[in-house]
Amino acid sequence: MQATRISGAAVLAATIAAFPLTVQAQSVPQEKSEVARPGGELPGNPEVSLVEIADGFHDPTNVANAGDGSGRLFVTERVGRIKVVDKEGNVQEEPFLDLTKINPLGNDVQTGFVEQGLYDVAFDPDFKENGYFYVHYASLPFNGDGVIVRFQVDPENPEAVTKERANETAKVILRIEQPYYNHNGGEINFGPDGYLYIGSGDGGWEGDPLEAGQDLSTLLGKMLRIDVHVPDGAAKPYRIPPDNPFVEAQEEQLMQLFGIGEETFSKIHTKARPEIWAYGLRNPYTFSFDQKSGDLFIADVGQNHWEEVDYQPADSKGGENYGWDILMGTHCFPLSGPTDEQTDCPTFGVLPAAEYPHQKPYPGADDLQDGWGCSVIGLGVANHENLDGVYLVGDWCSGRLWGLGWADGKWQFQELLQSTVQFTGGGYDEDGNVVAVNSNNPYLADQGPLENPPGKLWRILPKDEVPEGAETAPVVKKDKQ
Amino acid sequence: MKQRITVVGAVLAAVVIAAGAAPVLAQDGNIENTEPVVFKNVVTGEPLSYEGQPEQEITEAVTNFNETGENPYDGDASAIEAGKEIYESNACSGCHMPDGTGGMCPSLVDDQWTHEGLETDKGKFEIIYGGGVGAMQAYGDRLPQDDILKVVAFINDLHAQAK
């Protein structure tokens, strides 16, 4: 089945008609019944452990490697620092980048609200040659707007970027206005196509008061895709990739009224921002590319009742509408009562591959005992022998870790463990293992980015590959689950 | 790989060890030979290896609780009122809701408990003091034990009133 560029139900129906169901390769669900929920079974019933690499991070938000063969991991701390961890798990005392120092008026990073801070770092695919890396953070001078800024390492000092070097090389790529202090998105990653993808939240409050998810004229509530490899001094700090779905949507053109098909008209969006790759997202705080297949998984944090994981095959043409704020997961928004076999709402846009409920799956529901969470945190796609192409998904609130994989012709969403770990982000080490970070920062009792108890960096390994003597995260015993 | 050093909260440890040596007066007034109360991590079931506030006032209620596992503040109106204040000013109410019915976090007023033993004072103290899964952080370093006991009394009261 092809995941085609789908902009509406009519096209979706046409797609289904044109491609009879064949269920070999993993694909985007076309029916609500194909969307996985907790309780699935992955092949071989894999068991994993969270193996501690290092600790002592202040509200770590995410982690990445530089792809330079150094084996280093780079942990972003909410306050505005990037900490370096070497192959042996030693944490370098001097930060790789310290945004708390680059502005003489104080920290350049806004951390006033728990969702604000330094979100993520992404290293240029050619980092080893050009020394470029990119950060996404809430800017204090810009009142919490998200900024994507490029810095360049000094080849004479590859261990750390001094404040002078940071100021000399800083290039603001993009600023995303943030009207409210929550739902800022966060993760940035280079795709296998060399373009920079940016997870952008709907701007905040609750219920998407700006209707940003469905509004193609705003960068909020989107997955963005830009080409940052433009010459310095160019008119714009980035280019629009020529195959972005809305690249021509807003171009001026002569109006023709007759002799044009419905589909052509449907592609005219005079206000559409060409940076948009996919839309209808609420808060895609994390997302990951499968390093092997190039497939994209987006963890879209939901509101009150359901969390959502979206899947895009590597050959996606973009333009997917993931439904927010018409749907959350497969469910109506707003949800007023029980969803009867998920049939209450018509399908809208592209369905997720998986969804999981909060403790109350709808208003007034009895509390679930198992399989629930409250904030989906995508970590990365594992590619181990017994965990092949499985997207690892942590939950910020329940400490659960799920695996999303394809088996028996459908998506399977299996709980792998429930831990004490409050997941905040994840990525890969240079060997391709999934790594994760956790904070110890209760949302409602934030003591400040340097005052909360420190968090840790973990490597997620099959249980039988845990090194002897390694410290692993405490988990709820299986017989208790 | 770093080794975690197992440190039982200094105050807690001292009291637990002391309690182990002496028989404890049971509620009905009979002298019993009682095993010392061992506080556990509700997730792993292992003895609690977590250091709370190093300096705090050890009240009579705390000493009593450490010995018996029973909360002397249960049913004490002024302690319940104080517990309500602490519950509301330390984020408990934001996640478990002011009436304890839960939302992002589990309900505290039904009879379904996410870990074994949470229906008891000891279990409630253990998860607040030493933490549970995910976002249920350890509050032993933020709250003195006496405050935790008052919160437990408040939760017990909420639970009873919801019946």
Image (spheres, rainbow, N blue to C red):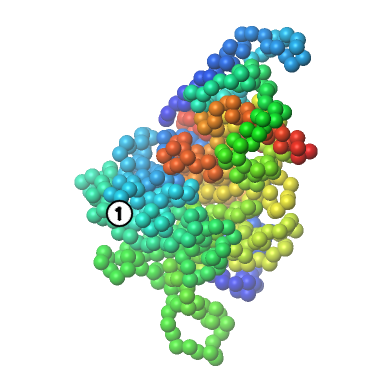
Q: For residue A214, which quarter of the picture?
A: bottom right
Is A197 positioned to the left or the right of A307 in the image? left
SS for dot 1: strand
Observer-nearest of A390 and A20: A390
Q: Is residue B100 visible?
A: yes
Horizontal and vertical percent for residue A373? 61, 46
Q: Which residue is mark 1?
A: A151
Is A287 positioned to the left or the right of B18 in the image? left
Q: Check the picture and name the quadrant holding the N terminus of chain A.
A: bottom right
Which residue is at 40% across, 71% downward?
Answer: A242
Q: Check the picture and name the quadrant holding the C terminus of chain A.
A: top right
Label 1 packing within 10 angstroms: few (<14), some (14-19), many (20+): many
Which residue is at 47% across, 26% downward?
Answer: B4
- Which chain letter goes with mark 1? A
Disc 1 marks a residue whose amino acid type is Phe
Observer-nearest of A54 and A273: A273
Horizontal and vertical percent for residue B77? 70, 30
Residue positioned most to the front: B78
Observer-nearest of A266 and B101: B101
Horizontal and vertical percent for residue A408? 64, 53
Residue positioned most to the bottom: A258
Is A416 positioned to the left or the right of A459 in the image? right
Horizontal and vertical percent for residue B37? 64, 18
Which residue is at 63% across, 62% downward?
Answer: A327
